[in-house]
Amino acid sequence: MTNMVSGNTLAAVAALIGDVSRANILAALMGGRALTAGELAECAGVSPQTASNHLSRLVDGQLVTVEKQGRHRYFRLASAEVAETLEHLSLLSAIGPVRYRPTGPKEEALRVARTCYDHMAGAIAVGIADSMVRSGAVVFDGNAGMVTDKGEALLAEFGISLSSAGNSRRPLCRTCLDWSERRPHIGGWLGAAVLRRSCERHWLRPAAEGRALMLTRSGQAGLAALFGLPDEMLKIVTPESCG
């Protein structure tokens, strides 16, 4: 008996992601929002019928899940593991040949802060991870992370109680390799809690469209005070400059 994934299974998953339209659908769902088939059709640049066919395949392949609310159906990524895999694939794409790396006005905002499914990615997220490791609040061991007593006190100051993680099936803290910074940010339950609390305190707010997270003036002051992030990392990027 072996738990190794067969070549056929791996190829099947890769084929699901490898289609451009399906890749665009998955990228849109990386924002963490549940979207309708019509919204995803627009993101992928295909007809609603074609989008529905792609979504059926993604649901069957357990990459996407569907939720029904009355007459409406909403789609989201099936798990944090799917989002982490897509983030790693983004990293591989980012280090490919220059001609395959499109640039645009949205890129700066995405590099500063963006959603990675339900947690934060980008320069600010990596800065938070670096700060917590440097101060001894978190200890990384490979992909796993441990929150120390010092970290628990820091998080309590931020309004996050680790006792709330008791009912979660997710790992408390784990690393997630950031595709734009090429260093780890914090994922798992803790990563989601940090993003949620940052939005509750109005330090960050989701952009009207896409995955970008907009840093606010209060966020500049709060992140600098709590995590000691430098001014050059805490860049205000306006929605207008994001295209």
Image (cartoon, helix red, strand yellow):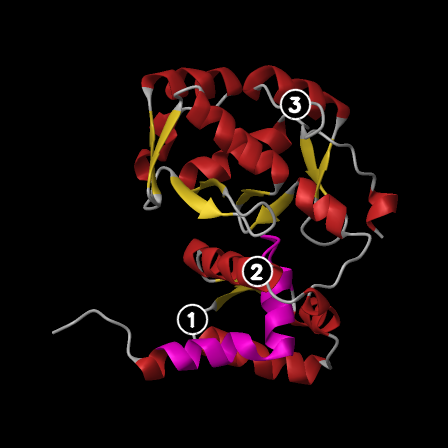
Q: Is residue 50 above or below residue 161?
A: below
Crowding at mark 1 (Cα within 10 Å: few <14, some 14-19, many 20+): some
Amino acid type at image mark 2: Ser
Residue toward you, 25 or 85: 85
Does residue 20 belong to the magenta stretch? yes
> What's the CA distance linking mark 2 and mark 3?
26 Å
User: What amino acid is at disc 3?
Assistant: Pro
The answer to whether 63 appears left or right of 241 in the picture is left
Give the label on residue 62, or none: 1
Instruction: Choose the circle earlier in sequence order: 1 or 2.
Output: 1
Determine the secondary structure under disc 1. Answer: loop
Expressed as whole percent of the image width and height from the top left, the position of residue 121 reads 57, 44
Q: Is residue 73 visible?
A: no
Residue occupied by mark 2: 90
Which residue is under mark 3? Answer: 230
Position in image of residue 157 (x %, y %): 49, 15
Position above or below: 53 against 182: below
Mark 2 neighbour density, 10 Å: few (under 14) some (14–19) many (20 or more): some
Image quadrant occupied by the N terminus: bottom left
